[in-house]
Amino acid sequence: MTRKKQLGADVLGVTTEYQGFLSIRRYEIDADRHDGGRQRVVRFIMERGHAVGVLAYDPLKDQVVLINEMRAGVLAAGGAPFADALIAGTVEEHEHPLEAARRETREEAGLELRDARIIHERAYVSPGGSSEYLTLIAGIVTAPEHETFEGNPAEGEDIRTSLLTPRRLMSAIKRGEINDMKTMLAAYWLTANRARLRHEHGATRSVAAGDATAHRGGEGDVQVL
């Protein structure tokens, strides 16, 4: 099989159109064409740095800690603005993604993240119009006994934490109640790695409290590992 040529592109010029919490810049680009030629194109790119998404999992309680807050982008698209999603936030300048993950977990969930590991690097959020990429991180937490109210007041955050077993998380995704892409990706990763995480941290293989009554064995159901 013939290996395809790796195409490339060159930035000819950048102009800032808007500067604020995020930036919008006009890029003039000279790019290869698949037919062997070249073309010049103009693209407007949103830039706001990079971010982390944190899968905060308690293997002993078999629970994932999610956060619920208003999402203006979803509201603008006509969706329900309040929904559960991963802990997440911007990686500050000179900050390692693991450091950002631990900081955001404290700020948004009031918890300490342990044994944090990168499970996916450079997942581009919207590569056609944004330079932002997300580092997906999984770590261990001690989940609280009940939902709490958290957030960084300086950033106007109003957050309620949510506690879901992996089975209930996948069910919420399949029902469309959770449609945040990073949360969906993390949930599938947890489905594949849950048994190993529980074994590493000395958890039993029993079904978590409250999960035993969940539907079992139906078509497409996520089985407890």
Image: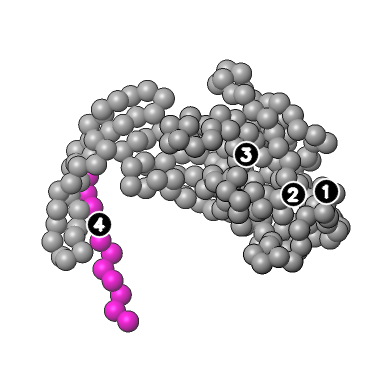
Residue on which disc 4 sits: 8
Residue on which disc 3 sits: 84
- 149 relative position to 49: left or right: right
Q: Amino acid at mark 1?
A: Gly
Q: Amino acid at mark 4?
A: Gly
Contact? badges 3 and 2 (CB < 8 Å): no
Q: Secondary structure at mark 1?
A: loop
Residue on which disc 2 sits: 165
Task: Look at 32% across and 81% down and name the residue there.
Answer: 1
Give whichever of discs 3 and 1 has the lower sequence position. 3
Task: Look at 48% across and 32% down and name the residue there.
Answer: 75
Contact? badges 4 and 3 (CB < 8 Å): no
Q: Which residues are magenta?
A: 1-11
Q: Nearer the viewer, mark 4 or mark 3?
A: 3
Between residue 49 and residue 17, name the one nearer to us.
Answer: 17
Q: Main secondary structure of the magenta part?
A: loop
Give whichever of discs 4 and 1 has the lower sequence position. 4
Q: Secondary structure at mark 2?
A: loop
The type of colouring in the image is one colour
Q: Nearer the viewer, mark 4 or mark 1?
A: 1
Q: Amino acid at mark 3?
A: Asp
Give whichever of discs 4 and 3 has the lower sequence position. 4
Residue on which disc 1 sits: 210
Task: Look at 28% across and 71% down and name the residue there.
Answer: 4
